[in-house]
Image: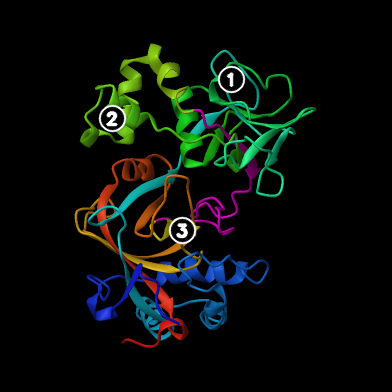
Amino acid sequence: MPLSPAFRQTTFADLPGWAEDDQSAAFDAFRRSAFHVLTKPYRTGALGVAFEAFSEAYAKARACPEISGAEARAFFERHFVPVFVMPEGRPAGLVTGFYEPEVEASPVRTDFFRVPLLSRPADLVDVDDQNRPAGLDPYLAFARQTPAGLVEYLDRPAIERGALAGQGLEIAWLADPVDAFFVHVQGAARLQMTDGSLRRVTYAAKSGQRFTGPGGILAEIGEIPLEKVTMQSIRAWFRANPERIDEILWRNRSYIFFREAEVDDPTLGPIAAAKVPLTPGRSVAVDRLLHTFGTPFFIAAPSLTAFGGQPFARLMIAQDTGSAITGPARGDLFAGSGFEAGEIAGVVRNDADFFALVPKQLVGDAS
C-alpha cells in the first residue's frame, strides 16, 4: 500500500544514533504490548499503519523472553522499515516529558492532608456520536447524567469548591494542591501512605473540558517568560505566590478522576492507554488518532540531554496518549517514577526528528 503523505521512507543507516542505541529495553516494552494484544487488539491509527501488520513481529517477540541489545536491533531491522514522520505546522517535531509523581498521602482527611484525589462519580458518563445531545460541545467525551438528560460535567472550580463532597469518592488525601494538580496532569501517581504502604492511582476518567496549562497562563499574564516555563519554574512561582494558586489552577476547567492500581513491578510505570505498564525511557505517548499503539518510534533530539547526559537518540514504543499530544511528529517521553524522573520530565521541550518503524509488509524492504 502507498505510504501516508506524513511518512517518507528511509533506511536504518539514515537514523542518527541508531547503531549506538541499546534497544533491548525497547524490545521488552514492545513484547509487553505483544502479549496484551492477544486479549484486545489495538486500533489502527488514521495514518494507516495497520495493526494486523504487526502480527508476525508480535509472535516472534512473544517467543523471545530474553534478548541482547544486538539481538534487539536485529529483530527490529528484520521486521520493520523506518519512515521519517513529517512534522505538521512547525519546522521540526516536538517532544515533551511526563512521569509518575510520588507523593505522601493519607487515607483520611486531616488538618495537614486536605486535598482529595477522587474516583469516578456515578453520574459521569462517556459521550460519543450515539448519545451526544444536540448543543453539547462536540469536544466533550464525558458528560453528566441528569433527569433532564446529558449536560456538561462539573468543572474543576466547582469540584474543588466541594460540588462532589459527601459521595465517598475520596481515594486518598494530599497536603499540597499543586502536588495534586500535577498528579492530574500526569494522570497517575505512587502514593506513599502515612501507614508506610505504597499505593498507586491511575487515570479513570475526566470531567471533559479542555485542558489549560498553568505554564501558558503564567506566560500570558507576564509572570514567567514562555521560554522559561518548566514544571520547576511553575512550582517555584506557586511557592512564591500561594495566595494565587486557585486563581491560576481554576482557569484549567478539566478535572481528572482516578482508580487504584497495583504496583506489581516497581521498576515500571503505571498501566497507560495501551494497557501495558510504561517503561521508563522507552515508552512514548503519541497522538492515538493518527498512530497505532505498539508502533516503535526512533526519536532523535540532539538538544535533549536530560536522559543520561547524552543527546537523545532512542527507540521508543507508542504506549500512551494525551490530550496535548496532537500531530504526527509529537511525542511525550515517559521518564519514570519519583522525584528524579520529575526533574527530567519537567525540563523536556525539544525539537526532535521522528522515525516510525513500519512493518515491512506495508511498505516493502528499504534496507
**Between disc 2 and disc 3, whose residue precedes?**
2
User: Residue type at mark 2?
Assistant: Ser
Q: Which mark is residue 158?
A: 1
Q: Is residue 288 above or below residue 48?
A: above
Q: Nearer the viewer, residue 33 or 89?
A: 89
Find residue 148 and report its horizontal and vertical position in percent: 77, 28
Q: Is residue 274 above or below residue 189?
A: below
**Between disc 1 and disc 3, whose residue precedes?**
1
Local secondary structure at mark 1? helix
Q: Is residue 224 visible?
A: yes
Left or right: 42 with respect to 103?
Answer: right
Number of the front mark, 2 or 3: 2
Quadrant location of the N terminus?
bottom left
Span highlighted in magenta in the image: 253-280
Left or right: 276 with respect to 234?
Answer: right
Q: Which mark is residue 233?
A: 2
User: Residue type at mark 3?
Assistant: Thr
Quadrant location of the C terminus?
bottom left
Residue visible at 45% across and 67% down? 47
Between the residue at mark 1 and the residue at mark 3, the CA separation in whole angstroms equals 36 Å
User: Residue type at mark 1?
Assistant: Ala
Neighbourhood count class around disc 3 (C-alpha, 10 Å): few under 14, some 14–19, many 20 upward:
many
Q: Main secondary structure of the magenta part?
A: loop
Neighbourhood count class around disc 2 (C-alpha, 10 Å): few under 14, some 14–19, many 20 upward:
some
Find residue 138 and report its horizontal and vertical position in percent: 57, 41
Between the residue at mark 2 and the residue at mark 3, the CA separation in whole angstroms equals 27 Å
Magenta residue check for 262: yes
Q: Which residue is mark 3?
A: 279
Number of the front mark, 1 or 2: 1
Residue visible at 61% across and 67% down? 36
**Between disc 1 and disc 2, whose residue precedes?**
1
